[in-house]
Amino acid sequence: MRTPQSHTALENPPSQSTLEDLRMPVQAKLAAAWTSLMFLVIYIGYFHLYQPGEIDEIRGGDIFEFDISGTLMSIFFVIIAIPALMVMLSMTLPARVNRATNLVVASLYIPIMVFNAAGATWDYALYYALTIGVEVLILAFILRSAGTWSRRTASPATLAASLDSEPLRTTQQA
């Protein structure tokens, strides 16, 4: 006799059960966050061009209060290249260096993102508040993810399992 709580696989197919929540590696979370930040920086800069008079100002050789020059364009390149590089570095650096790099770079990027408000007018205050707010939230997520990166001590079982997964090395005899 079946009780009300017992179910067969046909009565409760996997698509109707609880979703599987796999643990995402910290490196993947960091890379995803840097990717999001990079896209936001690009698109926010692009949408800035929609403000009246901006394209005329650029044609006149100015961006905000700065003269357009090779130096300014290099600064803009670095501002977008760093998050692009952080995507790759977050997935490839060793854990300790990865954690430190993410903490330092994200900390340095908060004032850079806030600086975008320097050219803001009251007409676009909401736009700048939203864009800077989202960028800072992503950077806070990066800081939190890197800062709370769990430290594990390898148990003997973990060490044995990792040794078992290494390919056998054979020595050639003459």
Image (spheres, rainbow, N blue to C red):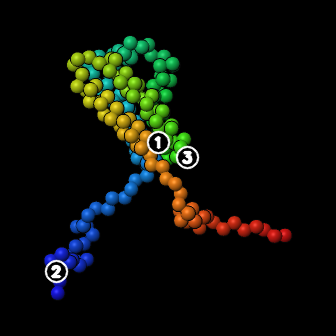
- Outermost residue, bottom side: 1
Q: Nearer the viewer, mark 2 or mark 3?
A: 2
Query: Residue 113: x, y in percent?
Result: 37, 27
Q: Nearer the viewer, mark 3 or mark 1?
A: 3
Classify mark 1: helix, strand or loop: helix
Instruction: Pick whichever of labels 3 and 1 is earlier in the sequence.
Output: 1
* Nearer to the camera, 112 or 4: 4
Residue drawn at point x = 33 percent, y = 17 percent:
119
Residue under label 1: 87
Residue under label 3: 94
Q: Amino acid at mark 1?
A: Val
Q: Quadrant of the C terminus?
A: bottom right
Q: Amino acid at mark 3?
A: Pro
Cα distance in 3D space between marks 2 and 3? 52 Å
Q: Is residue 149 left or right of residue 127?
A: right
Residue drawn at point x = 49 percent, y = 28 percent:
78
Q: Amino acid at mark 2?
A: Thr
Residue drawn at point x = 42 percent, y = 44 percent:
148
Classify mark 2: helix, strand or loop: loop
Residue drawn at point x = 33 percent, y = 58 percent:
21
Query: Residue 39: x, y in percent?
Result: 37, 37
User: Total label count?
Assistant: 3
* Nearer to the camera, 35 or 71: 35
Query: Residue 92: x, y in percent?
Result: 53, 47
Q: Nearer the viewer, mark 1 or mark 2?
A: 2
Q: Is residue 33 above or below residue 14?
A: above
Instruction: Pick whichever of labels 2 and 3 is earlier in the sequence.
Output: 2
> Is residue 85 among the parts visible in the rendering?
no
Residue under label 2: 3
